[in-house]
Image (cartoon, rainbow, N blue to C red):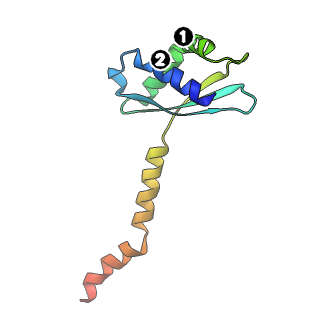
Amino acid sequence: MASLIRETVASFLRGIPQQEYGIISITEVEVSSDLQYATIFVSTLKNPEGALQLLKKNEHEIMGLLQKSLTTYRIPSLRYKIDDRGERGERIDKLLNDSSPQNSRGSTQGKGA
């Protein structure tokens, strides 16, 4: 179900202008085990809050598209979240690289030679 929701929302986004947000991507969809909720993770180059507002503003249309494409009785309620996992990963990598033994050895090697 998650992949159908992702494809439906992505298809909807392809049909609307996105200049204000850069490219809006649906990076992941998580559906609760009881099919009550679907959390849609969104990534964009600029104005992520605006992209979330765009999706919320058009939720009625998105739900209509989901009703046509999903064969289940219940359509999950949609939640939208900014996917900041890439940024978090970059920060963690930077912290790990800054604290690695190589970096601390590299700064002391030139002093004794």
In terms of depth relative to the viewer, which is nearer, 15 or 108? Answer: 15
Dot 1 corresponds to which residue? 61
Few, some or many C-alpha atoms within 10 Å of disc 1 (few <14, some 14-19, many ≥20)?
some
Quarter-of-image position of residue 98:
bottom left
What amino acid type is highlighted by mark number 2? Phe
If the image is split into quadrants, where does the C terminus sit? bottom left
Quarter-of-image position of residue 73:
top right
| Residue 82 pos. (x, y %) | 50, 34
Dots 1, 2 in contact, CB < 8 A: yes
- Tell me if residue 10 comes above or below residue 59 in the rendering: below
Dot 2 corresponds to which residue? 12
| Residue 84 pos. (x, y %) | 48, 41
Q: Nearer the viewer, mark 1 or mark 2?
A: 2
Q: Which of marks 1 and 2 is nearer the N terminus?
A: 2
Q: Along the horizontal axis of the image, is 1 left or right of 53?
A: right
In terms of depth relative to the viewer, which is nearer, 24 or 68? Answer: 68
Q: Which residue is drawn at 54% across and 10% down?
A: 61
